[in-house]
Structure formats: structure tokens, C-alpha cells
Image: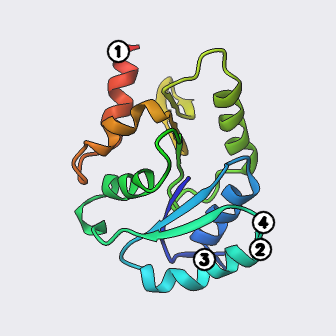
Amino acid sequence: MLAVLGEIERAGRSLLEIVGATCLASMVDETVIVTGASADDASERFDVLRSAFPDVALRCLVNERWAEGRTGTIQAAWASCPAGADLLVFPVDHPAVRLVTLDVLLGVHGYAAREPDILVPVTIVDEQRRRGHPVLLSHRLRDEVLSLRPDQPLHEVVHARDASG
């Protein structure tokens, strides 16, 4: 799981706390919170999560190159994980995603007859398909994602898979 720190507050809790708590309560094996520009402010939020979920795997890393682009933050997270790890990209600016949504994505991924490369929630509004977050990426895409430029949008990988499938 990946969260990018944002210090906006909602109902007295930071978005990092809301998204982090959702991930930590889910079936995710490990939560990796990646911070950048607000790294100094993140330590207090991280400690709140750590105390609320003391028995769950939780790491925080700082992406020193955060200004180079959002994909660089995703790359920092995935590069810090074991080679066979799948990645759930859950941006901190999506705090309304519920625990059940995460667990459904993880369940579909884990129990599918054939493991998908990408799982993306899709909504249809006025006959228009819209992809959303969180996005679950198979370990098979790790090298492709790590080879992107830090400023190259991750959705290029998602759209390329959609067009070829």
C-alpha cells in the first residue's frame, strides 16, 4: 500500500491517518507510507497510526526526490518491497474509500482463477467509464513501473493494459 502524505484534516484527523487506518485494518500484508515535502510533519501522524495498530506491519519512508513526480513516490515504495510483492496504490487524497472496498480488491486479486495484472475500481456515470483508486498492481508489473520516469503518469501503464486487453 502506498499513501502520499497530505496534511489536510477531516473530522479532526489528517488524511494520512484516515487512509492509513483503512489500510492497516484491511487484509494488506504491509502498509508502506511514503512521505515527501511534508516528511517532518508526518512523524506525529505515523506515531498515531503505530499506536493504534501496534501488531500490524507498518513502515514509513521518505522520498527525497518527491518533487520529480508522483510516480517516483510509487517507485520508492515498490523498490523498498520484496521482489514478489504486489502493490496497492492508495493515494491519501482518497479518504472516502472504505475498508470493504480494499478487502474486495484484495480478495478478487487473491482468489481469482488467474491473477490479474491490474485491478482498478471502475464507475460508469452517464455511460462514461471512469477509473478510480485504489489500484492494485501485480508484481509482474514491477520492472515496468520502476522503469518509468518519476514524472511519467502511472495511468499510462494502466491504459496500455486496458487497450491491449
Vertical placement of residue 64 versus 108, above or below: below
Query: Which residue is at a point 52% across and 70% down the rendered structure image?
Result: 60
Q: Residues within 10 Å of mark 2 (few under 14, many from 20)?
A: few
Q: CA distance from mark 1 to mark 2?
A: 43 Å
Q: Residues within 10 Å of mark 3 (few under 14, many from 20)?
A: some
Query: Which residue is at a point 49% across and 85% down the rendered structure image?
Result: 41
Q: How far across and how far down the image is residue 68, in percent?
A: 23, 62
Q: How is the image coloured?
A: rainbow
Task: Please give the label number shown on residue 52.
Answer: 2
Q: CA distance from mark 4 to mark 3?
A: 14 Å
Contact, mark 1 vs mark 2 (Cβ under 8 Å):
no
Upstream in sequence: badge 3 or badge 2? 3
Q: How far across and how far down the image is residue 146, in percent?
A: 31, 45
Give the labeled residue for mark 1: 164
Residue 10 visible somewhere in the drawing? yes
Q: Is residue 109 left or right of residue 132?
A: right
Q: CA distance from mark 1 to mark 4?
A: 41 Å
Contact, mark 4 vs mark 2 (Cβ under 8 Å):
no
Residue 12 visible somewhere in the drawing? no
Q: How far across and how far down the image is residue 9, in percent?
A: 59, 77
Give the labeled residue for mark 3: 46
What amino acid type is highlighted by mark number 3?
Phe
Upstream in sequence: badge 4 or badge 3? 3
Task: Please give the label number shown on residue 55.
Answer: 4
